């Protein structure tokens, strides 16, 4: 399929207001599209569904999905499409002083209560001369090949786009992997990477939380890290967490509820952090810091049987595979208005000025493609 044919099908879906998603997984060459064959709205019930899911930060709100069985699934192998050039200057919805005050309030709360960490975010708005979500997606793919890039449209949510560096959950058969990503600094190629105690502590909150909650679901649990992860012009601390599902009747929904939202996007203890976010952030995050990706998609794999009566005969088995990413480095597109999101983890060792600058550094990932 040519690039023109591929994107013509997407434009047809846009004109008919049918839900669709374009995405490219980390280090994966093809671009895949799920195009729903009708305009029906599908809401996740128990995560036994199969399709592409788009879930909000607050798990009490609806998660939407595009069903695998009632969608046209197409792929584009080549990525030599043309892209546009445009320059925009995002403006924070709240002033810098407002965010500084919010961070200071969070530090006071941490020092006087059970709250240990809370992730606080900001919105930035851009007025665009041109608003073509497909062009923005093309630039995301070209600029961030190691990220999970996507362009999602649904009549109930509108357009969302992003380039996430963080895997929430990969599940194939009984094999599970996730990651802790927390701690941030600007990439400086000429310097040796060193991490201060604030970033190390912030990262440890996330890793320790994942290991603790996943102990009810996985056996054994293995961790690898922390390592330094490059994401655009930023560096993060990353620890991989892997294991195999225990032989229990616990569902994927229970597993997702246990890990989402993680301390990387919410805080710890989770209930206290959620309360602080909802009471003090001045907007609804909606799908920022939620998650997205393929859910229970049939995957064929080739196995070999080495029993004596079968001479290494190869056969295929079908497994359901799930790969979900945290919705970070993202934006919402409303006609020619782009709303960008970024946040940072606040601990007792945080400096409000540094935390404010971190949110401004993080939006450069999306700003670069506008």
Image: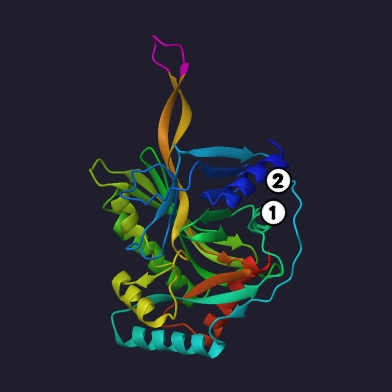
Q: Nearer the viewer, residue 279 or 119?
A: 279
- State how far apart marks 1 and 2 are (Cα): 8 Å
Of mark 1 and mark 2, the one earlier in the sequence is 2
SS for dot 2: loop
Residue located at (49% from left, 40% from top): 71
Which one is nearer the viewer's eye here, 277 or 200?
277
Q: How many marks?
A: 2
Figure quadrant of residue 152: bottom right
The relative height of residue 59 versus residue 345 in the rendered view (above or below) is above
Looking at the rendering, the stretch of residues picked out in magenta corresponds to 306-314
Coordinates of residue 32 in the picture (x, y in percent): 58, 43
Q: Quadrant of the N terminus?
A: top right
Residue 197 point in image, percent of width and height: 47, 76
Q: Using the rendered image of the protein, determine whether residue 227 is visible from the camera's viewpoint.
A: no
Q: Which residue is mark 2?
A: 79
| Residue in the picture at 69% in, 54% down | 142
Q: Is residue 307 magenta?
A: yes
């Amino acid at each position: 399929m040519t690039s023109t044919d591929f994107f013509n099908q997407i434009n047809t879906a846009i004109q008919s207001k049918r839900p669709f998603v374009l995405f490219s997984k980390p280090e994966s060459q093809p671009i895949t599209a799920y195009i729903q064959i009708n305009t029906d709205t599908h809401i996740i019930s128990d995560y036994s569904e199969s399709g592409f899911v788009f879930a909000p930060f607050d798990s009490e709100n609806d998660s939407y999905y595009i069903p695998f069985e009632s969608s046209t699934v197409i792929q584009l192998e080549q990525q030599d499409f043309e892209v546009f050039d445009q320059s925009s200057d995002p403006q924070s919805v709240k002033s810098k002083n407002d965010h500084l005050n919010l961070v200071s309030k969070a530090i006071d709360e941490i020092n006087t209560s059970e709250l240990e960490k809370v992730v606080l975010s900001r919105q930035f708005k851009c007025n665009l001369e041109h608003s073509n979500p497909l062009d923005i997606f093309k630039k995301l793919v070209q600029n961030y090949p190691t990220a999970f890039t996507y362009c999602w449209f649904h009549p109930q949510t509108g357009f969302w786009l992003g380039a996430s560096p963080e895997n929430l959950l990969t599940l194939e058969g009984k094999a599970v992997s996730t990651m802790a990503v927390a701690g941030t600094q600007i990439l400086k190629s000429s310097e040796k990477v060193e991490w201060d105690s604030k970033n190390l502590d912030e990262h440890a909150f996330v890793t320790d939380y994942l290991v603790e909650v996943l102990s009810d679901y996985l056996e054994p649990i293995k961790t690898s890290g922390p390592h330094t992860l490059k994401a655009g012009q930023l560096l993060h601390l990353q620890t991989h967490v892997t294991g195999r599902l225990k032989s229990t009747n616990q569902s994927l929904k229970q597993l997702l509820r246990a890990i989402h939202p993680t301390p990387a996007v919410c805080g710890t203890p989770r209930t206290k952090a959620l309360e602080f976010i909802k009471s003090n952030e001045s907007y609804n995050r909606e799908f920022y810091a939620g998650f997205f990706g393929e859910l229970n998609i049939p995957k064929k794999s080739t196995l070999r049987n080495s029993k004596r009566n079968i001479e290494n005969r190869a056969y295929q088995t079908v497994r359901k595979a799930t790969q979900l990413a945290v919705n970070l480095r993202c934006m919402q597109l409303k006609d020619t208005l782009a709303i960008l999101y970024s946040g940072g983890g606040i601990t007792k060792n945080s400096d409000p000025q540094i935390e404010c600058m971190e949110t401004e550094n993080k939006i450069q990932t999306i700003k670069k493609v506008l």
